[in-house]
Amino acid sequence: GGTSGDATDVGGVLDVQSVPPDPAPGDTVAFRDLARDQLPRLYSIARRLVGDDAEDAVQDCLLKAYQRYGQLKDGAAGPAWLVSILVNCCRDRGRVRSRSPRMVDVDELEHFSLYRKIAYEDPLPYSDSLHLDFLAGFGSEDVRAVLLRLPELYRVPLVLVYMDGFLAKEVARFLGAPLGTVLARLHRGRKLFERELWDYAEENDLMRRVSS
């Protein structure tokens, strides 16, 4: 997916006239360069974290980042710094939209295996590569829809580690959580993602689409 207009046009997302002027003009130029380079990546992450609220979340992120840009001491850390701000903006939006987080039965989750479920149900009886064909039925929009079904608690680390390539310890720093907590959320998040893949496929007749 893409934003309305040019997804790489910082001016279309961030109106620097709407925030307090930066005392260092050079910082404004450097920030614009950083934001322009990172905007497609920020939007991609935001789409996975908050869906249709992605543009608003990215705008929140860039406004906050612009106001705090003087705090960034290492230019090389700029991309990760922007992502950390974006993650918090997405979490804020998620809290506003969902006042009561969805509960997950951890014990039931531990016993679920997508691999075993597919083998047992055999949804594609004429397939020689059953599991691969099942996964091939999911387009990018389907995957995004499944991600948005997950509680934010699990969705955020899954997206950042498995889809955007951050280390678990970096995500722990973004979230202000112990590394062990993030690792536990990644484990449970993977299991929950597998279960939601199966449920989504059943609800949307993906197996029929693959076999037809």
Image (cartoon, rainbow, N blue to C red):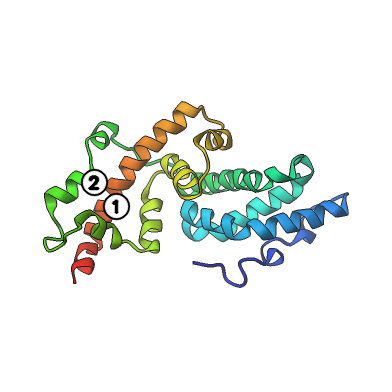
Mark 2: which amino acid? Leu
Q: Which residue is mark 1?
A: 197
Secondary element at tag 2: helix
| Viewer-closest of 34 and 176 | 34
Rate crowding at label 1 as few (under 14), some (14 to 19) or many (20 or more) other CA atoms within 10 Å. many
Question: Looking at numbered disc 1 in the image, what kind of residue is underneath it?
Answer: Leu
**Tag 2–tag 1 contact (CB < 8 Å):** yes
Residue beneath the point at 44% across and 39% down:
153
Question: Quick check: 144 above or below 84?
Answer: below
Closer to viewer: mark 2 or mark 1: 2
Q: Position of residue 54 (x, y in %)?
A: 54, 58
Q: Residue 114 has which mark?
A: 2
Quadrant location of residue 36?
Answer: bottom right
Task: Write the residue at 51% across / 27% down.
Answer: 178
Residue at 45% from the left image edge and 29% from the top image edge: 181
Label 2, residues with CA under 10 Å away: few <14, some 14-19, many ≥20: some
Alpha-carbon span between mark 2 and mark 1: 8 Å
Query: Is 81 left, or right, of 168 in this rendering?
Result: right
Q: Residue furthest front?
A: 128
Residue 180: x %, y % from top left: 45, 27
Instruction: Please state if 106 lies on the left or on the right of 148 as rendered.
Output: left
Quadrant of the snapshot with the C terminus: bottom left
